[in-house]
Image (cartoon, helix red, strand yellow):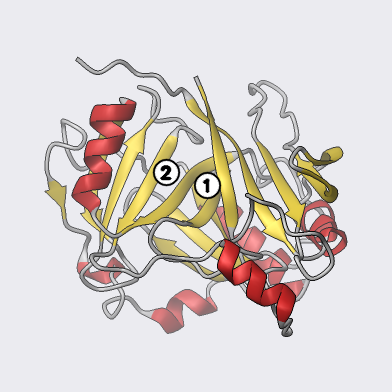
Amino acid sequence: MNQMVIKGVNSQTFVAANLGRVEKFYRDFLGLPVVKRTVHHLNQHLPVITFGFRKFTGEPQSGHTISYVEWNPIFYMMPERGFTEHETTTQGVASPRVGDPKGRWGAGTNHHLALHVLNRNGLLKWKRRLTDLGVHVTGPYNRHYFHATYLRDPDGAIIEIATSEPGFGHDEAVLGSGFRPQPKENLIGGRDEVLVAAETWPQPVAAITDDFALRGFHHITSISADAERTERFFVETIGLRLIKKTDYLDEKGGTHFYYACDEDLSPGSVLTFFGLPGYPPGRLGTGLAHHFHAGS
């Protein structure tokens, strides 16, 4: 019998080229406070900034944090282990090009971090606020178990903002008991992209109010080239609960498996994987997450 050993995801760390613009993005655009400034434990030349989430009256503190490491091998000594593939880093130092060392997501890397808002109106307010600030936002998309919009951080990492409605359990009595296909109108090629792109909040949103402020993590999504192998690892070895098997909405032929760290399926307790058979491996670098931390 499996024993739950992970209670939730506490933090995620990204690799960035410039912490100044990252700070402006999270502090001024997304409204997240800076909670720590330090250097990386493997290399004191690598600065780190950490963001937290506001405390809301009557709600428990999420405890979630987002950290960024400023990394550029052109300007720093190359570590023996760390943030990018050693061969790629060596090439970047020996023959620097504009954009090095940009990461490339693929099998084995994180795909996106999803942050949590209460409802769909919150998504529309974020879309209007960020669009007015010059940030490109896509959505809101109906993901069947929640609704979501998407944007990118200053280095290109994908950030999702997702709702808690309607919830993972609304289309099956026993979670994860079978594959649940997505409605055709949710799938790429079947949804009305023009209608989705046009939908936004009708008035400018200058201030971040409690009704749509970011409350912490919703889920973290990574990429697997073998969904069944990943399932065996997280269910049999780690002890997570498989709660959904469904379609990957944005690429035909892919799957999307959801794993829960707690019985309540609360935001921040869910890990998901896109199953993309034969997908090439990614390469760590700026614009990608380096790792996430799960608490027991």
Mark with earlier residue (2, 1): 1
Query: Residue at coordinates 75% horizontally, 46% vertically from top-left?
Result: 209
Amino acid found under the numbered disc labelled 1: Asn
- Residue 286 or residue 163, whichever sits in front: 286
* Residue 183 placement: quadrant: bottom left
* Residue 142 placement: quadrant: bottom left
Q: How crowded is mark 1: few (under 14 residues within 10 Å), some or many (20 or more)?
A: some
- Residue 26 or residue 277, whichever sits in front: 277
Tag 1's secondary structure?
loop
Q: Position of residue 199 (x, y in %)?
A: 53, 73
Q: Position of residue 37 (x, y in %)?
A: 87, 40
| 119 relative to 75, above or below | above
Q: Where is residue 173 in the image (x, y as percent from the top left)?
A: 16, 32
| 296 relative to 256, above or below | above
> What residue sits right under mark 1 in the picture?
119
In this rendering, would 50 be left or right of 9? right
Which quadrant: the N terminus? top left
Confirm or deny contact between disc 2 and disc 1 (CB under 8 A). yes
In this rendering, would 161 be left or right of 40? left
| 262 relative to 48, above or below | above
> What residue sits right under mark 2 in the picture?
165
Q: Visible in this render: residue 169?
A: no
Amino acid found under the numbered disc labelled 2: Glu
In the image, farthest residue toward the left: 178
Q: How far apart are marks 2 and 1 (CA)?
A: 7 Å
Query: Residue at coordinates 35% horizontally, 70% vertically from top-left?
Result: 280
In this rendering, would 280 be left or right of 156? left
Tag 2's secondary structure?
loop
* Residue 278 placement: quadrant: bottom left
